[in-house]
């Protein structure tokens, strides 16, 4: 039994390790987009489905014992490609849409090895079922082992592998483990004997399972995947698209499989009984997160808690509906995998192109409602009207009446939602009808919950952009939860840059005082184009912007680019690629102001990219990094990078005052005269490496956010939150 458990666990471990390693390697090539992970997941699900179909078809055609020879050969084929051959992925621009380009690159790099690994769980379960081992009566236990291996990979990656090993070292470790897997399979093949089994025709096997049963497996498989991917989108969009935050929802999804598919399944009855109120609470959390009443760490915890209950419910329904015959087991997994693939396509490929909101989260909940068993055929009319009234009051009336945190109103809100969805759950059709209505009304409801009237709201593969006029007389440009810029609506005042870029800000005062005597300035990240106001006839500004939609929004809805007093150029494309094409020593000042989520993408803040930046600087030039961040402290990262390159580094933090919003900027220069002027006349503070900082220097081959998470800020947000305030 151990010879089957080890390959099952190890193959799943390797499968999910390579997902995380490769997805992280791909991030820099796609501007750190939060959807890179979702796009990678779709590929992994597609290959997983292909592996399941392959194993299902050949196991039925050949039988278990003959297929094992095919299985061993399949494990050796990837050695001709990856992992034996080196994995090369350089910064290159892509011509296909993001998700299609990722799919193609993954296919030609790790496709063969991923395909071989994807067949392993199904093969070992069939192997066990056909063996003389006493555990052969319950092969589904190995599926729990497989998911436990996947969970172990997710848990160890951000805390061990990403923390202590470079990407190259991670790949080397992965190669060694793959060879161990091959050896373990050879040992198992030589020592575990199988019974002679009659070969069932594929049609005979499939005919024993009804279409409705297969559709149920497919829908449950899709619901779980849509839920964990949409929760991932919300969480990473709030903070940053990094493996540490990728693993939370996926780990919850896998743990639900482990608990439900193990030898003695575990799923508390209350999770099934109260699935209606849980769905209602999840809908409420979706809208409540947009109010920003609750600390972000509490929002993430609540989203993850609700995701766990929902995944436990879907996996419990799957194990309850498993086929009665072991011969139908492979079809069971094929349908689950097919549902997961369709769920991934819907979440990562389709919805981002047709919706301006993260509505995939509500779509996942809608799929779950379709799987809720009906207790009553139809609710009485008065009960339907009462539930609709409570739902309308909760999702339309409450956000218009409550504009600040108040525990009493929160309790009343949760009671309304809990009671109405508990009653609705007894009539599945009416529950689905109500949830479908909420989905249709989501764009309108979001403007109510956010208390803003959007001039435009646009979504693409890089995020959701919102432009609106606030009650303070300014136009606001928001990307997710990150403020990209603001501008006075009054034409008489619109030439004054505001917010992070005001004349009082570190970057504003630096450009006004012309500390670097700049004749040309390069800016990575356009936003609203507020820095254009500092352009001069003799000092043009070149913007490097990844997303063409940002340029369109900045040009159409803001006036900074149009009213700039000097020449302004916008270069579209990845900043690293575009800068590399620009002439050397072209800039006296480079401003790094690109954000993905709430942080600068890691490939724009490391020692390797600093070498590229420096080639574009004049001898006395400098680089300024915008590091304002709620959750990550980038100062020690930049201090290590500056020390490695021999640069002087200083930081300046200016708080809220007048038209200025608090912002933190770091400047690097290799000119001691410029640096001396900054710290003596411009109030910049020298930044030194603290002995307490355990940050390893970042490079293209290594980065991790774990040591730089601003635990103090998170603690303050929780401490200042007063949940008992009535």
Image (spheres, rainbow, N blue to C red):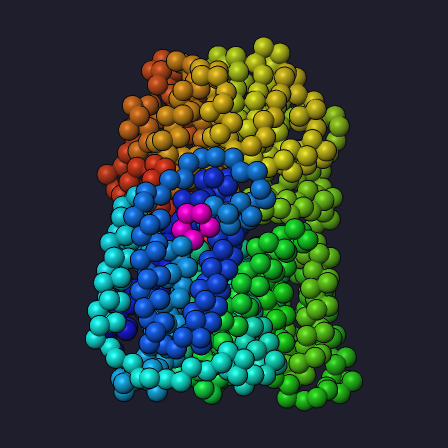
Above-or-below relation of 621 to 247: above
Q: Nearer the viewer, residue 407 or 447?
A: 447
> Residue 123 at x, y = what percent?
37, 72
Residue 459 visible (yes or no):
yes
Q: Quadrant of the C terminus?
A: bottom right
> Residue 457 at x, y = what percent?
69, 47
Q: Kindly give the residue lying farthest to the top in the view shown.
A: 538
> Residue 610 at x, y = what percent?
38, 28
Image quarter of residue 11: bottom left
Above-or-below relation of 332 to 667: below
Residue 267 visible (yes or no):
no
Above-or-below relation of 619 to 251: above
Magenta residue check for 133: no
Image quarter of residue 121: bottom left
Image quarter of residue 433: bottom right
Q: Residue at x 59, y 66 (%)?
A: 364
Dominant secondary structure (helix, strand or loop) of the stretch shown in magenta: helix
Left or right of 346? Residue 702 is: left
Left or right of 26? Residue 9 is: left
Q: Residue at x 58, y 72 (%)?
A: 219
Q: Residue at x 74, y 74 (%)?
A: 389
Left or right of 72? Residue 317 is: right
Q: Residue at x 33, y 15 (%)?
A: 672
Q: Nearer the viewer, residue 458 or 37?
A: 37
Q: Quadrant of the N terminus?
A: bottom left
Q: Nearer the viewer, residue 312 or 306?
A: 312
Above-or-below relation of 652 to 79: above
Give the magenta range: 107-111
> Residue 50 at x, y = what percent?
48, 63
Q: How many marks?
A: 0
């Amino acid at each position: 039994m151990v010879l089957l458990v080890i390959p099952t666990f190890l193959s799943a471990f390797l499968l999910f390790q390579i997902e995380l390693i490769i997805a992280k390697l791909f991030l820099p090539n796609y501007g750190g987009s939060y959807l890179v992970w979702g796009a990678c997941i779709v590929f992994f699900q597609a290959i997983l489905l292909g592996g399941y179909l392959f194993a299902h078809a050949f196991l039925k055609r050949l039988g278990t014992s003959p297929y094992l020879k095919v299985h061993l050969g399949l494990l050796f084929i990837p050695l001709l490609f990856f992992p034996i051959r080196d994995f090369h992925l350089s910064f290159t621009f892509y011509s296909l849409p993001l998700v299609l380009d990722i799919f193609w690159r993954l296919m030609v790099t790790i496709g063969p090895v991923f395909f071989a690994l994807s067949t392993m769980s199904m093969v070992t379960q069939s192997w066990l079922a056909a063996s003389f081992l006493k555990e052969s009566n319950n092969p589904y236990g190995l599926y729990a082992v497989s998911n436990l291996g996947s969970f172990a990979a997710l848990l160890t990656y951000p805390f061990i592998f990403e923390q202590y090993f470079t990407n190259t070292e991670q790949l080397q470790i992965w190669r060694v483990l793959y060879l161990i897997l091959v050896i373990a399979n050879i040992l198992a093949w030589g020592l575990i004997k199988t019974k002679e089994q009659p070969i069932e025709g594929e049609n005979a096997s499939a005919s024993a399972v009804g279409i409705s049963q297969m559709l149920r497996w497919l829908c449950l498989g899709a619901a779980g995947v849509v839920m964990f991917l949409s929760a991932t989108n919300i969480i990473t969009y709030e903070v940053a698209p990094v493996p540490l935050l990728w693993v939370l929802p996926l780990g919850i999804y896998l743990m639900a499989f482990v608990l439900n598919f193990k030898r003695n399944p575990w799923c508390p009855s209350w999770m099934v009984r109260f699935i209606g109120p849980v769905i209602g609470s999840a809908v409420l959390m979706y809208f409540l997160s947009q109010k920003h009443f609750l600390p972000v760490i509490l929002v993430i915890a609540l989203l993850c808690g609700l995701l766990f209950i929902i995944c436990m419910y879907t996996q419990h329904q799957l194990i309850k509906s498993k086929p009665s015959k072991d011969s139908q087991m492979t079809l069971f997994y094929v349908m689950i995998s097919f549902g997961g693939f369709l769920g991934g396509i819907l979440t990562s490929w389709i919805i981002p192109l047709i919706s301006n909101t993260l509505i995939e989260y509500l779509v996942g909940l809608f799929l779950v409602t379709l799987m809720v068993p009906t207790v009553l055929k139809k609710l009485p009319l008065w009960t339907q009207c009462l539930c609709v009234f409570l739902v309308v009051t909760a999702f339309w009336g409450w956000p218009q009446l409550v504009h600040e945190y108040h525990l009493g109103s929160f309790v009343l809100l949760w009671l309304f939602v809990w009671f109405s969805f508990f009653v609705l759950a007894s009539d599945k059709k009416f529950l689905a009808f109500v949830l479908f209505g909420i989905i249709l009304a989501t764009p309108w409801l979001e403007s109510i919950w956010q208390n803003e009237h959007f001039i435009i709201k646009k979504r693409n593969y890089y995020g959701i952009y919102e432009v609106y006029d606030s009650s303070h007389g300014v136009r606001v440009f928001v990307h997710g939860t990150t403020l990209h810029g603001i501008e006075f609506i009054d034409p008489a005042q619109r030439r004054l840059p505001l917010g992070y870029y005001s004349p009082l800000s570190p970057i504003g005062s630096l450009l006004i005082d012309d500390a670097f005597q700049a004749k040309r300035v390069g800016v990575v990240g356009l936003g609203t184009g507020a820095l254009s106001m500092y352009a001069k006839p003799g000092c043009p500004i070149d913007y490097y912007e990844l997303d063409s939609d940002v340029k369109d929004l900045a040009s159409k809805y803001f006036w900074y680019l149009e009213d700039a007093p000097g020449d302004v150029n916008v270069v579209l494309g990845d900043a690293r690629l575009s800068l590399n094409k620009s002439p050397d020593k072209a800039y006296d000042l480079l401003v790094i102001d690109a954000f993905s989520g709430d942080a600068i993408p890691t490939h724009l803040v490391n020692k390797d990219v600093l070498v590229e930046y420096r080639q574009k600087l004049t001898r006395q030039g400098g680089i300024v990094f915008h590091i304002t961040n709620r959750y990550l402290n980038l100062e020690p990262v930049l201090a290590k990078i500056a020390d490695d390159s021999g640069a002087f580094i200083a930081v300046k933090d200016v708080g809220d005052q007048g038209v200025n919003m608090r912002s933190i900027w770091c400047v690097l220069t290799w000119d001691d005269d410029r640096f001396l002027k900054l710290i003596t006349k411009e109030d910049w503070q020298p930044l030194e490496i603290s002995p307490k900082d355990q940050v390893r220097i970042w490079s293209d081959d290594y980065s991790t956010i774990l040591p730089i998470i601003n635990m103090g800020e998170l603690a303050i947000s929780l401490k200042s939150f007063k949940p008992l305030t009535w």
